[in-house]
Amino acid sequence: MASATRRIVCSFKQQKLFYLKSRLQYHAVALPLDHARPCGYVEQIHPLATRFFHASKAFYGEKVPFKLSDIGEGITEVTVKEWYVKEGDKVAQFDPICEVQSDKASVTITSRYDGLISKLHYAVDEMAKVGTPLVDIEVSGSVSEAPVEELQEKDAIPLGEREESLELPAENQSKVLTTPAVRKMASDNKINLRDVQGTGRDGRILKEDMLRHIESLSSSKSAPKTSQVPQQQAKAVERGTISQQQSPSPKTPQIMRPSAPVGVDRTEPIKGFKKAMAKSMTASLRIPHFGYCDEIDMTSMAALRHSLKESPMVKERGIKLSFMPFFIKAASMALHHFPVLNSSVDEACENITYKASHNIGFAMDTSLGLIVPNVKNVQSLSVMDVAIELARLQELGNKGSLGATDLTGGTFTLSNIGSIGGTYAKPVIMSPEVAIGAIGRVQVLPRFNSKGEVVRASIMQVSWSADHRVIDGASMARFSNLWKAYLENPSTMILDLK
């Protein structure tokens, strides 16, 4: 070590460059002064020393791991799709290094340093973790004494003050800056990116530049072809073979898409009913849903409703009699026979509470969002009472003045999605309830009667969801069959009315 140090000191003394102390301290090598003094070691730094070491190859010796930064949207790993550099290449800041693909988008990773690529940590199609090194770069120029992790969190990393800037190699200057989408367009159309004139920052090729280049190529190719067609036809006439010639296949037209989106994106906070819905639906994700669907013949119920709508009693009260009061009352009557569907469970699912009241909720679409008020104590109400309560809740819901009492305390829910459209749905249970039904629209469809004749029938589909932790499929099917029997034969409801 002493002899090596003496040779270094003497060499620098001959060149009159006094930068030895800083370089040896940088590499943590102690310089023995008894060997340094005979060679005339001086602790002053000559102004020319910085210039000499800045241009020397020794500055390509410090390896810095270039880590894959967090690219947002909760992405923790990406697939390396393409490398734009190889080991030994020289790169500058903002030069493209590689293209990575997540499950949401493709991203081009650019360099943060000037230097040499010393190692590629991943091969093409390998999975790279966020926060792990992508490549090792031998940094050119002096680097800060700050830790590497701190440096990589900055947008632009200073490479130290220097009196002369290193010129970029020609191979780095010739690299084309563009996006993965433009590279794919160039690959599909067999276009060399160096032939395209970029109008973006630092000569970056934009999508509009590529479309303009493709259009110019197609127009330049079509001009000589149009002039050659008459000559080919004349030669074919002379040979008498014009009928045997095949017309050239037309080219697929290029779609010109707008360069900018129409309109402006906007962000607004989730609040009010939407925030409450987000909270309740998030809680519902913990419930294992069981689905069950069935078809109901509403022909008899439709005839009954039509006759009741013409009744003076209904007209005097000014009530619009829909199918919903019948659906709710029939559900309450069926819940008497299957009380487990009118229950609730605690968060740990260790206790089940059977509700005495049938507070049946119904989904309501308002200008403020989806709300689910409920009709209290349906077991004690008539069909007309339910219709009057529904009218009151709908009026308050449209005004946005429903109270907390109307929106809480539900034990069972029906969603009449058919009033908007659709036949089947997959309803989500409103925790802590254990069941919910979605009712489709009524359609006039051909069906066979008891005599085997094809008849017109008013058919409606219903989709049930139940908490499979406390409700089995047989219970859900039997409940649905009883509810279906009440609606298909409305006269049977009289037998269970209380």
Image (cartoon, helix red, strand yellow):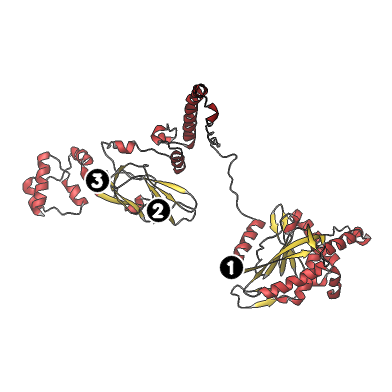
- 243 or 285, which lies in front? 243
- Residue 244 pos. (x, y %): 53, 30
What kind of residue is marked 2?
Answer: Asp
| Secondary-structure class at tag 1 | loop
Q: Residue at x 65, y 64 (%)?
A: 428
**Residue 76 coordinates in the image, percent (x, y):** 44, 57
User: Disc 2 to disc 1, how far (Cα)?
Assistant: 36 Å
Nearer the observer, 34 or 451: 451
Examine the rendered structure and indicate whether residue 70 appears above or below residue 290: above
Instruction: Kindly state the secondary structure of the residue where label 2 is placed.
Output: loop
Please give the label number shown on residue 286. 1
Q: Secondary structure at mark 3?
A: helix
Residue 433 placed where, x, y %? Answer: 67, 70
For label 3, the residue is: 60
Sequence-wise, the earlier of marks 3 and 1 is 3
Residue type at mark 3: give it. Tyr
Q: CA distance from mark 3 to mark 2?
A: 29 Å
Residue at the (37%, 52%) spot, across then down: 124
Outermost residue, left side? 38
Q: In the picture provided, is 426 more to the left or to the right than 233?
A: right
Mark 2 or mark 1, which has the lower sequence index?
A: 2
* Upstream in sequence: badge 3 or badge 2: 3
Q: Is residue 281 left or right of residue 69?
A: right
